[in-house]
Image (spheres, rainbow, N blue to C red):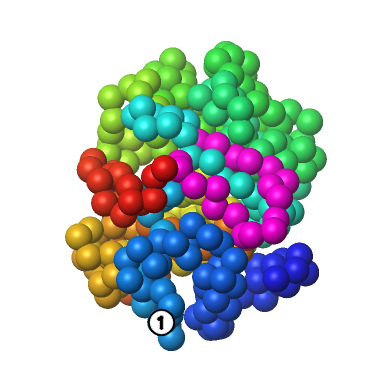
Amino acid sequence: MNREEAISIIESTNYTNFNEMAMRVFSYQTENVHPFQLYQKLIGFYPQGPRLPEWIPFLPISAFKSQVVIASGLDAERVYSSSSTGGKGPSQHYVAENSLYQKSYLKGFELAYGKPEDWCFFCLLPSYMEREGSSLISMASDLVQRSKDPDSGFFLYDHAALYQLLLKKIASGQKTLLLGVSFALLDFAEAYTLPASNLLIMETGGMKGRKKELIRHELHKILSNRLGVSKIHSEYGMTELLSQAYSKGDGRFFCPPWMRVVVRDQLDPLGEDLIGKRGRICVIDLANVYSCSFIETDDLGIVYEDGSFEVLGRLDYTDIRGCNVMVG
């Protein structure tokens, strides 16, 4: 699959032709992505192959810790890595065409919030800035550069400067997005309060071991009360994906047209997709055309009839099943 075909996956996929495009990507990856092909053989799935996306197996996300997940014959243009929280080592995502990532996050953001050029971006992402290879930092940096507001930028621990600039933007009415990791937003909210405004605050999740874990509802209540907004937005993404889903404050995440989330039974990864029931979140991200678009995550959630989903937490026994047979 050449670059033009890969980009067209993002540009031409919509909610009605998703299944067709997913099968096209699945066929390509089954033939060209060795770890995905190997996993199918190990579970006795390959070479029969599915006829519908509902029957596609999902590669356990732990494969990205032990395998080079990239189509054969391609070199990585960028290698993104996760934090190694939990002591299990980082995941590494070998990205053959970084332009696919850029195309995905820019179009995804525009579909949800409009053109990045119209926004002022304040980024409070210390844990990501303090290590190499963060895909979130790459995305946020590009959004900051595309913003026409000269005040857009990153704040490590300079909360006082951030506070003053937020007051300035609130007074001017400029569309402003404060993007932050959960623990950093809590630190800021403990030190400062803001007046009621249309400021958009978006958390990326994760305490990264810095604070006690809170359920999303508790976190959002604290942040909204302290920072003067009615709702807290959220971003659902990860190192192993090239696309993001967004929640506009009601706990429900919505995917762009080339991304879909399904839930399957935790003990039956090849079982049917569950609607309205708790299970393991599995993601189809067609932007991942040169790695793996079908990923079984370590997250617990619910998918609803309209395709939106809710994240309920993390599974605590990951790496026991699935890709442990691929380690080595």
Task: Work out whether residue 133 or residue 65 is closer to the camera in this orientation and state it.
Answer: 65
Q: Position of residue 319 (x, y in %)?
A: 30, 44
Q: Which of the pair 104/77 is nearer the observer?
A: 77
Magenta stretch secondary structure, dominant? loop
- Most foreground residue, 117 or 76: 76
Relative to 116, residue 130 above or below? above
Q: Residue at the location (38% across, 54% down)?
A: 60
Q: Which residues are magenta?
A: 64-82
- 224 is higher (above) or lower (below) than 255: above
On screen, residue 244 versus residue 266, left or right, reads right
73 in magenta: yes
- Disc 1 is placed on an element classified as loop
Q: On the picture, is 127 further left or further right than 322?
A: right
Q: Residue at x 33, y 35 (%)?
A: 219
Quick check: 2 above or below 174? below
> What amino acid is found at the position of numbered circle 1 in the picture?
Gln
Task: In this rendered view, identify the residue nearer to me: 302 or 93.
Answer: 93
Residue at x 78% of width, y 31% of height:
150
Decide if residue 45 is on the left or right side of residue 233: left
Give the residue furthest to the front: 328
The answer to which image quadrant residue 121 occupies is top right
**Residue 204, position as x, y percentages in the image:** 47, 39
Does residue 148 belong to the magenta stretch?
no
Residue 8: % across, % down: 71, 72
The 10 Å Cα crowd at callout 1, few under 14, some 14 to 19, many 20 or more, is few
- The reply to whether residue 278 is in sight is no
Q: Which quadrant, please, contains the C terminus? A: top left
Quadrant for the N terminus in the image: bottom right
Which residue corresponds to the image point at 56% horizontal and 62% vertical from the top-left? 33
Which residue is under mark 1?
A: 48
